[in-house]
Image (cartoon, rainbow, N blue to C red):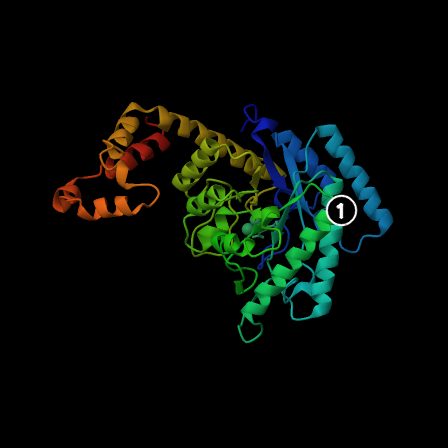
């Protein structure tokens, strides 16, 4: 597979934890030798990525000495400088260490909650040191297996207090940094609080600094919940809250699969790419996915190239869809409006309301019209199948 059409301006990014995944799963040991952060930067540069994101502990192991940390940072920076890769986003690992077994910001133990704040402030410093302008919060352990163990209102208040505290930290340090909150319904916890992008959007409005926080929706997370990902993304975009995005793929109702972007639901991926391109989403296209456990590092490169190529192919398909005369004619017919009812819409006035209440509608005639959606959807499928 070639990468000649993939360029940094496409803003494709990957986490160190994605291409660096050694293929461990709950049933099996690693299948690939670990690579250092610097080696992963070179791998990403080879496939044409724009940037790399990290959790604090993807870069610096949790028990590293200051000298070890300094050496890793030096190597990493050297690789970034040599390749030109950027670090647009950073985040905190608040889920791997046993201390977080019952959550971080929502833990019942104040020692854990305080440690989580300390770890996040240090990780924010690290992200900013490498130029990150978006800081993701994914509360993988912020949940329960049993509601006997934690009060959900308390959990939400603890989360709010933590995010408020960290917003103030960013303001105090004068960092140019926004927060992107990432929802997931479950896994690794039985249930996770703020389970969907919609929950997160509502939660953000309750913060002391709602303008500092947006969302980081992930395809797999909404699909796990059986939701329409595009609708969540569109709602976030319309609210000015689409600060970041995690692209991958996932069958609904399964374990967290993290498949290559577009590998499962091509039609959903198509409408997502079409949306992001048409609204002019300016942020990174971040792939939060893993190569199959069957792969060696050549396969990891195939996986990364596949994510980016599929995105670009779907972008091309979206242009084709927009240029298709038959599709455009159908859209014009579907959205036909002779303007005669325009006076009834828009801002309420008592006169408008009175006139609308008196208007006579031919209900049966309106309902009888076929809407041509079968034809439109089939044409969409044919564009995707490459026969149009
Ligand atoms: C997951 C999540 C994570 C987060 C990452 C960044 O399901 O494991 O998607 O990959 O995106 O921790 O915060
Ligand atoms: Mn995920
Ligand atoms: Mn994610």
- Does residue 27 lie above or below 175 as drawn? below
Q: Residue at x 14, y 42 (%)?
A: 368
The answer to whether residue 351 is left or right of residue 206 is left
Q: Is residue 373 left or right of residue 249?
A: left
- Looking at the rendered structure, the secondary structure element under dot 1 is helix
Give the labeled residue for mark 1. Answer: 173
Choose between 299 and 227: the one closer to the eye: 227
Q: Is mark 1 within 8 Å of ligand 1?
A: no
For the image, the number of numbered tags is 1
Q: Is residue 115 left or right of residue 330?
A: right
Name the residue: 16% across, 42% down: 366
Quarter of the figure that contains the C terminus? top left
Residue 94 in view: no
Q: Is residue 230 above or below residue 378?
A: below
Quarter of the image for residue 372 reads: top left
Query: Left of 117 or right of it: where is 67?
Result: right
Residue 238: percent from left, percent from top: 46, 42
Residue under the point 59% across and 58% down: 140
Mark 1 burial class by Cα count in 10 Å: few <14, some 14-19, many 20+? few
Q: Residue furthest bottom?
A: 148
Horizontal and vertical percent for residue 245? 54, 43
Query: Is residue 193 visible to us here?
Result: yes
Residue found farthest to the front: 351
């Amino acid at each position: 597979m070639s990468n000649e059409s993939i360029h940094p301006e496409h803003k494709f990014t990957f986490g160190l934890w994605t291409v660096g995944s050694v293929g461990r799963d709950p049933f099996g040991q690693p299948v690939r030798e670990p690579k250092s952060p610097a080696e992963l930067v070179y791998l990403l540069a080879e496939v044409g990525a724009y940037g790399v994101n990290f959790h604090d502990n993807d870069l610096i192991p949790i028990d590293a000495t200051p000298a070890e940390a300094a050496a890793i940072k030096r190597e990493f920076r050297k690789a970034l400088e040599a390749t030109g890769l950027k670090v647009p986003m950073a985040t905190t690992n608040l889920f791997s260490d046993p201390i977080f077994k019952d959550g971080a910001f929502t833990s019942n133990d104040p020692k854990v909650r305080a440690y989580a704040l300390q770890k996040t402030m240090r990780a924010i410093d690290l992200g900013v040191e490498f130029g990150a302008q978006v800081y993701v919060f994914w509360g993988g352990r912020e949940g329960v297996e049993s509601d006997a163990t934690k009060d959900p209102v308390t959990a939400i208040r603890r989360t709010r207090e933590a995010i408020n505290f960290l917003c103030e930290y960013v303001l105090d340090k004068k960092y140019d940094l926004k927060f992107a909150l990432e929802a997931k319904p479950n896994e690794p916890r039985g249930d996770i609080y703020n389970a969907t992008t919609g929950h997160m959007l509502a939660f953000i409005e309750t913060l002391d600094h709602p303008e500092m926080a947006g969302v980081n929706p992930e395809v797999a997370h909404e699909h796990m919940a059986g939701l329409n990902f595009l609708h969540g993304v569109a709602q976030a975009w319309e609210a000015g809250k689409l600060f970041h995005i995690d692209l991958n793929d996932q069958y609904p109702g399964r374990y967290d699969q993290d498949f290559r972007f577009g590998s499962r639901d091509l039609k959903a991926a198509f409408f997502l790419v079409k949306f992001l391109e048409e609204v002019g989403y300016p942020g990174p296209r971040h792939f939060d996915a893993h190569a199959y456990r069957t792969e060696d590092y050549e396969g990891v490169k195939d996986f990364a190239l596949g994510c980016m190529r599929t995105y670009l192919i779907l972008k091309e398909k979206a242009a084709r869809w927009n240029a298709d005369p038959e599709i455009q004619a159908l859209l014009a017919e579907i959205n036909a409006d002779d303007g005669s009812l325009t006076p009834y819409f828009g801002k309420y006035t008592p006169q408008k309301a009175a006139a609308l209440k008196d208007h006579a509608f031919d209900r049966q005639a309106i309902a009888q019209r076929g809407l041509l959606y079968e034809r439109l959807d089939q044409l969409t499928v044919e564009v995707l199948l490459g026969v149009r």
